[in-house]
Amino acid sequence: MGKTYDRIDGRLRTFIEAQPLFFTATAPLSGDGTVNLSPKGLKGSFAVLDELTFAYLDFAGSNAETVAHLRENGRITLMWCAFQGPPNIVRVHGRGEAVLRDDPRFKELLGHFPDIDPSLHGLRAIIVVTAETIRDSCGYAVPFMTYEEDRDLHARRFAREDDESLSDYFAKRQIATSLDGLPGLPLPLPPSTV
């Protein structure tokens, strides 16, 4: 039986911070719009800011569905599954915002990710999520899987990019709009404030 929590602390926070993988889900307001579900990993790219607020780094390499949906309506769900240890699933339903590289808050937020070199990953934005509903469930059907290590491919691919080449890359990937035509990331890419 699932339980609802008022905040992320104690055992729940420890569980979330120990997971090497989580998922994000967003959707446009349109009933026939594209629902987006994305896996997120890379050790050090997720942070609990306080008992109701999370942040994660939004890197180059994917479309801009999450950013576009957050710009339109702010709805987001994060989910963690226990692939090792006792079964558990935690979902956080909340409101999210994409803090872009030229936002005055960007530098301070980036300080929550000391183990990540933003120049290696084509950092586009920091997604900040405020929890509205926090629930867990059993996770009995989630299989056991073993985490070995992060892949180094992302850093190897994007370490050679600068702001200008990243903007060219993003223009080719058509991240200025979502699959449904919503505004995505502004191009050219805002210059980094760090």
Image (cartoon, rainbow, N blue to C red):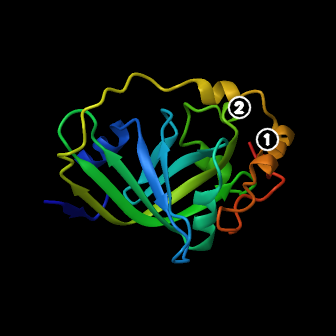
Residue 166: mark in rendering: 1
The answer to which quarter of the image holds residue 7 is: bottom left
Image x and y of residue 41, in percent: 48, 38
Residue 100: mark in rendering: none
Would residue 191 be visible to someone looking at this image?
no
Q: Which residue lies at the image location 17% right of the left edge and 46% below the top edge?
A: 140
Q: Which residue lies at the image location 81% right of the left edge and 35% below the top edge?
A: 162
Image x and y of residue 99, in percent: 64, 57
Circle 1 crowding by C-alpha within 10 Å: few under 14, some 14–19, many from 20: some
Which residue bears the numbered disc 2? 158
Measured along the vertical axis of the image, is residue 6 above or below residue 145?
A: below
Image x and y of residue 135, in percent: 27, 61
Front position in the image: 68 or 74: 68
Front position in the image: 184 or 13: 184
Q: Is residue 98 left or right of residue 168?
A: left
Q: CA distance from mark 2 to mark 1?
A: 8 Å
Outermost residue to the front: 32
Is the C terminus in the top left, top right, bottom left or bottom right quadrant?
A: top right
Circles 2 and 1: CB atoms closer than 8 Å: yes
Q: Is residue 50 left or right of residue 133?
A: right
Q: Which residue lies at the image location 55% right of the left edge and 39% below the top edge?
A: 113
Measured along the vertical axis of the image, is residue 67 above or below residue 41?
A: below
The answer to which quarter of the image holds residue 19 is: top left
